[in-house]
Every structure is written in structure tokens, then in C-alpha cells.
Image: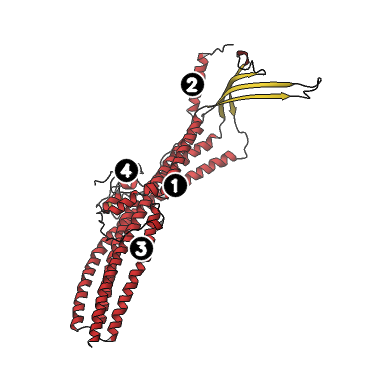
Amino acid sequence: MKLKFDAPRIIVFAAMLALLAACTVGPKYVRPTVDTPAVYKEAGDWKVAQPRDELKRGKWWETFGDALLNGLIEQIDISNQNVRFAEAQFRQARAFVQSARAGLFPSLTGSAAATRSGTGSSASSRGGGVANDFTLSLDAAWEVDVWGRVRKSVESSVAGAQASAADLEAARLSAQAELALNYFQLRVLDAQRQLLDDSVAAFQKSLDLTRNRYAAGVAGKVEVVQADTQLKSTQAQAIDIGVQRAQFEHAIAILIGKPPAEFSLAPIPLNVVMPSIPASLPSELLERRPDIAAAERRVAAANAQIGVAKSAFFPALTLSGSAGFQNSSFAQWLTLPSRFWAVGPAIAQSIFDAGLRRALTDQAIAVYDANVANYRRTVLGGFQEVEDNLAALHVLEQEAKLQDDAVQAARQSLDLTINQYKAGTVSYLNVVTVQTAWLTNERTAFGIRGRRLTAVVTLVKALGGGWTATEPSR
């Protein structure tokens, strides 16, 4: 039997399906507006920012000129477990996109079956009998995406995958910044430890000098005790630094995916370059913040889910068909008379669901509103972080200049007081006082330098990484 196809009817039917498939329910996505300042209070004129996380961030850490730091940060992509976790989640999100897109195409299923059945007693001459049934079929089904449910699901999955990609960038940037912060704090402690060790050597000489003067009868016992107290106190401070240094070293080991027992950093001088901050930072840098991009993409995904929920109010149209062979005789199974086929549409519509579809739609709208609020909060938080760290850099730069002057004055005062003590014009208490002031000012200067480095790294993170959108020149 030959099938005859009516070409005009098929064309009309295909055109109707195309028109129906063009229908999509649910709101069209528009990026939420955010009130942003025209300028940064702490950095002059800035252009209004939009998320642009796809721009290259560059190796911003190389601006500090520390080869060891560069090598450590390069290991993050390979060994950091938070980054690997985010990368696995991104691959999972991409798989969700593929699974959602599969709904746009028909499904095809093949099956083969051989059954033997009987009624009554097969051994009885009066009873029933035994029958064989051999079936080979190919079944096809396609849910016509009349109301855009599948397309909205794909749209939501794509936006979710983009958000996951931004999360990966955020995890990478966070790990890079955290490693840099820990590294600089460790180097500041190394510098302070070296300062304390040098002070211990100098205080030991002062103690020896005081003991000699005591032996010569030109100094009292109290001066020897004062010198010894100052020496022991400084030694204790030097030892105490070891606690914090070990903790920073362990934190760096974890960030590069190594057990703390298998990682160590030898003390070296703090010789990093303090990057110069441009007078007017381009607002494009804020556009690349991955957390802002992720929040915005989640708004888009939630918006698409509203369309998915609303499509449930409309009937679902499914086209299905099957063809194959069926016979009770194996010998006659795959013959032309045993063939069969069936094709036809089916429409399904939920009539009563006790408010389930309305509740799911309200839920999708609430999720969208929550994501909009989170997006706006993330943007405003980004502006605050940039403002905070620009202000910190400006204030700390002024403080560093004054503190350097204080260090120079403390060194001069120390030299003069020691000479006066040797000449016998002042007591050792004066020496202890100026030595303490000198040591305090030196440690404070290192502390301010560490805070400036922290502010620079935190500003880099707040801006999404780097000062420019391209790789920096080497």
C-alpha cells in the first residue's frame, strides 16, 4: 500500500506550525537599571559603567615586580581547589544548556520485542492456546514549542551558564587577590623580623656598653637592668612574629593546592614596586567585575523562567508517529504485509490544578525580583569597594610620607642620644626612650607600606582585575 501525500496541505500545516512556534509567552528581558554616580568622589570623573566581564584582565600582579609572587599566582589555575570547583560547576552549567536545547528537536526511539503468551492450560485439549507476538518499531515524538517553553528554558540555561562562567572568573580573581594579600603580609612580617633582629644586635651592643660602664663605676645597676629588659623584650617580639608568618605561609600553600607541610617561603627583603594609580581610572574596569556580570546573568535566567512558568497555562501540542513490523510468526515477521504505521497530533491541557500554575508563576516572579535586588546591591557594593580603597590609598600615601619623616627624625634622635649617653650627659633611660620610639616608628612605617599594598590589591579586585583591558607590557 502506497501513501499519498497532499503537498498543499502539508505546506499549510508546516506554515501553521511555524507561526505557532513563533509565539512566546513571558516578559522580554531588559537589563535592570541601577542608579550610579556620574563621578567617583575619591577619583574624579568616571563614565557610567555596564558589566563587561568578557574583557581580558591581564596579569595585574606583575605590576608589583616580584617574580616569586608571579610564579605563585600562576599556580592558582592549576591547583586551587576553589577554582577547580567553580570550573566543574561551569562545565555542569554548559551541560544543562545542551540538555535544554535537546527539547527543541524530536525524539526517536527504537524497540524490538518477542513475547509468548497463553490462556488456560496449554496441555488441555479444551483450554486456550499459546500465541507468539514479534514486534519491531520506530517511534518519534516532538513537542511543538508553541508557547516558547523550551526556548525560554534554553534562554534560562544559557544565562545560567554565563553566570557560572562569571563565577569561575570571580573565584579565580578572589584566589589571586587573596594570595597576593597573604604574600605581602608575609613579606611585611619578614621586614619587621629583620628590623627586630637588627635591633636585637644593636641592643646587645648597648647592653655590653652599659655593663662595661657599670664595671667602670660610671653607670648604675638600674641602667644595666633597663638595657637587659629592652633586649629581652625585643627578642620576644621577634619570636612572636613567627606565629603570624607561619599562618600566612600555610594560607598561601592552601591557595596553590599544596599541604602546608610541603611548602615554605624563605624570608627575603620587601622589594615590591608600589604601582602608581592613574589620576582618573577608566570606568570600563568596573564593568568587568565578574560578580556583577554573574548577578546580571542570573536576572536574565530568572526572567526566562517566568516565561517557562506562564507557558504552563496553555495547551501542549505533541506530534507523534510510529512505524514498524508486527506478526505472530517469526518467519513472516519482517515482511511487507506485517508492516504498520501511525501518525497524529495530540493536545494536552491542564484543566484543574488547585492554583499550582499560578503559584509557580508567582514564585518565578519573586525569584526574578530577588535577583534584580541582588544585582543592584552588587553594583552598589562594587562602587563602595572602589571608593573605600581609593580613599585608603590617598590617605595612606600622605600618612606614609609623614611616617618616613618621623622615621628619619627618630634615627637622628637615637644617634644624638647615644652620643650624649657615651659622653655621660644623659642617663640610659633617655636611650631606652628614643630606641623604643625609633623601633616603633620603623615598624609603623612597614605596617603602612603593607596597608598600602593591601589597598592596591583590594582595589584591583574591586575593579575586576588589572588597570587596563589588555595584557600589560612585560
Q: Image check: 462 left or right of 115?
A: left
Q: Nearer the viewer, mark 1 or mark 4?
A: 1
Q: Is residue 191 above or below residue 41?
A: below
Q: Nearer the viewer, mark 4 or mark 2?
A: 4
Seen at 22% across and 67% down, the residue is 405
Q: Residues within 10 Å of mark 2 (few under 14, many from 20)?
A: few
Question: Does the residue at mark 1 contact the one at mark 3 (Cβ under 8 Å)?
Answer: no
| Residue bearing mark 1 | 85
Q: Is residue 443 above or below residue 90?
A: below
The amino acid sitting under disc 4 is Lys
**Residue 260 at what x, y percent from top left?**
40, 57
Q: Is residue 172 above or below residue 406?
A: above
Is 364 in front, or is 277?
Answer: 277
Seen at 49% across and 31% down, the residue is 102
Question: Does the residue at mark 4 contact the one at mark 2 (Cβ under 8 Å)?
Answer: no
| Residue bearing mark 4 | 56
The amino acid sitting under disc 1 is Phe
Q: Secondary structure at mark 1?
A: helix
Q: Residues within 10 Å of mark 1 (few under 14, many from 20)?
A: few
Q: Secondary structure at mark 2?
A: helix
Seen at 21% across and 78% down, the residue is 418
Q: Secondary structure at mark 4?
A: loop
| Residue bearing mark 2 | 15
The amino acid sitting under disc 2 is Ala
Sequence-first disc among 1 and 3 = 1
Sequence-first disc among 4 and 2 = 2
Q: Nearer the viewer, mark 2 or mark 1?
A: 1
| Residue bearing mark 3 | 245
Q: Is residue 452 above or below residue 369?
A: below
Marks 4/3: CA–CA distance: 34 Å
